[in-house]
Amino acid sequence: MIVIYHDFGGAHTSCVCANIHANILPSDKVPNKEDIMNLPTFDKITKEQYGHLLYIGTDEFGAKVYTLCRKQKQKFVLPAISDMYVIFNGDMNGFFLANTSPTVNNLMRLGGFSSRGLGLVSFGRPIAAKGIQKNYSELANLV
């Protein structure tokens, strides 16, 4: 099975959901800000990684878990990925796309824009992490 968590930037909600899914972050309690900020892909996606599947880990059932920064191209990118899966596997069994965008709050938007958009990483990253903590149960429920 393949699970892909996707959103606009691929650096915050999709990162955290994928890490919950791969049992790197807990699903039953809110991690501290440092645990979130120390994830290898949290708020660290580069332009070269846009549109690429980033492997996060494997869950307890052997499903491979990825994230995807799709920007505003959801209508193009997701059907292409789904079609490729069907071409190689014959159907959609074992394939799941999870949109994490509905879990984004204003703290994550402010932090993500400050860090990724304006380059103010030391200002924005902790704000984005605080936003993650605020909505953590929602993220865990999505997973």
Image: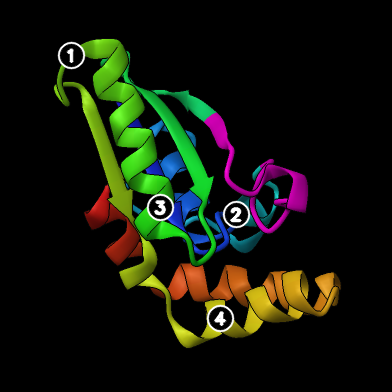
Identify the residue position indicated by label 2 in the image: 36
N-term mark: 1 or 2:
2
Q: Reading the chain from its start, which is encountered first: label 1 or label 3?
A: 3
Q: Nearer the viewer, mark 1 or mark 4?
A: 1
Callout 1 crowding tier (Cα within 10 Å): few <14, some 14–19, many ≥20 = few
Q: Which residue is mark 4?
A: 109
Q: x, y percentage for residue 81?
A: 38, 35
Q: Amino acid at mark 2?
A: Ile
CA separation, marks 4 and 3?
23 Å
136 over 51 or under it: above or below: below
Up/down of 104 relative to 86, above or below:
below
The residue that appears at 85% across and 77% down in the rendered structure is: 120
Under circle 3, the secondary element is helix
What distance separates the C-alpha of mark 2 from that of mark 4?
16 Å
Please identify the quarter of the rendering in which residue 39 is found.
top right
Do we see residue 34 in this rendering? Answer: yes
Stretch of the chain drawn in magenta: 40-55
Q: Position of residue 127 (x, y in %)?
A: 65, 78
Q: Are marks 1 and 3 in contact (CB under 8 Å)?
A: no
**Residue density around tag 4, few if under 14, some if 14–19, many if 20 or more, within 10 Å:** some
